[in-house]
Structures are given as C-alpha cells and as structure tokens.
Image (cartoon, helix red, strand yellow):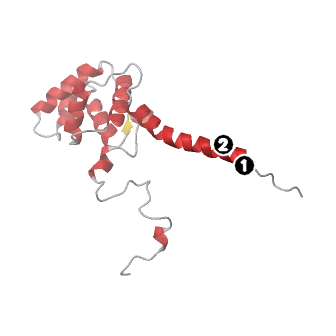
Amino acid sequence: MKAPVEPSRREVLGTVAVLVLASGFLPGAMERALAASPAGVTTKPIFWDISKSLTGQPEPDPGLGNRLYAVLDENYHDLDAKLTLVSELLAKQDSGSGLRQAAEAQQAGLGALVDDLVNGWYLGVVGPPAKRRCIAFENIVSYRVVDKALPIPSYCGGAPAFWSVRPAGI
C-alpha cells in the first residue's frame, strides 16, 4: 500500500494566496459585470420610469434592470417606441390593474411586453413559454417586498443545523 502524497508547504501557500486574491477580486468583479449593460445596449430613462411605476420600488436593482432591458431589446422590435406607448398608457391609468388589457387594445403584442416587464422584475423570467429565459433569482422584486419578514428561499435561516434543535416553548 502506497503512502498518500502530501502537498508541499510551497504548494499549500500558493493555493492559499490564490484563494485570498480571488476572494478579494471576484465579488467586486461580479458586481461590476452584473451591473454593466451588455455591449451595444443602453438602458433608456423611460424604461426606468416604467419600472419604478410597475414595481413600486424607488430604486429598482440596476443589474437586473440592465439584464431585463437587454433581453427585451432582443425580443421586441422597436422596443423604445413600444416603451413610449406603455408609458403613455401608464400615465392614463390610475392603477396598473388594467394596463395589460389597455396595452393589448392599443397595439397587438404590447400586452406581452407589459407581461415581460412585470415577470422580469417580479419573477426574474422573461419571454414566451417556449423561449423563456431566467435572468435573475435573488434580487427580484418579489423578495425585496417581503425581505423584512422572509429570507430568500435559497438562503439558510439560521446557524448550521439550526433545524435540528427543538424551538423554545415546544
């Protein structure tokens, strides 16, 4: 039986150094990459105005907004003109409840854009059923609305193995 090969001190220190450098660099790099608009796509101010109105959030997440706008730009011909129509319809509505029907009555396919805007912000999913794309999970508006009371489903609610200890009073 062969003895296991142990790494040298130099190999261990090199690995630790790489991990330390990567841990300091990667979070900032990931944030910048997610917040940046995709190449050639510039998010328009009207998109942000509509998004604030539909989500009720004073400052929607910029990374999610940039990704949502880029996907909408791929899926909808003449997106900016359609966003202008949606903005005009929003200005006429006293609430967003009839917006989808009003949009579809104004122009065929405009209701689908409204659906994609709401679904993109609240669910992180955009597109028709056959070509649906997930663009976000943890930073969607659905979680921001309830973040004071509920954790994001993929996050642990306590310390490791917290679930194995009987709660007080039971």
Q: Residue at x 38, y 53 (%)?
A: 152
Q: Is residue 161 visible?
A: yes
| Image position, residue 23 (x, y; %) | 52, 43
Tell me if label 2 and label 1 are in contact, CB under 8 Å: no
Q: Residue at x 20, y 42 (%)?
A: 56
Asked whether 106 or 22 is in front, the reply is 22
Task: Please tell me the numbered disc located at residue 9.
Answer: 1
| Quadrant (top left, top right, bottom left, bottom right) of the N terminus | bottom right
Give the residue type that dot 1 points to: Arg
Residue 105 seen anywhere in this rendered image of the structure: no
Question: Identity of the amino acid at label 2?
Answer: Gly
Q: Quadrant of residue 63?
A: top left
The residue at which mark 2 appears reads as: 14
Q: Is residue 168 above or below residue 148?
A: below
Q: Quadrant of the C terminus?
A: bottom left
User: Which element carries disc 2, helix, strand or loop?
Assistant: helix
State the SS at label 1: helix
Residue at figure coordinates x 80%, y 51% from the top left = 5
- Closer-to-camera residue (156/76): 156
Task: Check disc 1: other Cα within 10 Å, few if <14, some if 14-19, many if 20+.
Answer: few
Disc on the earlier residue, 2 or 1: 1
Q: Position of residue 120 (x, y in %)?
A: 33, 37
The answer to whether 20 appears left or right of 123 in the picture is right
For this orientation, the residue located farthest to the bottom is: 170
Question: Dividing the picture into quarters, in which one does residue 121 lie?
Answer: top left
- The spot of residue 30 in percent (x, y) is 45, 36
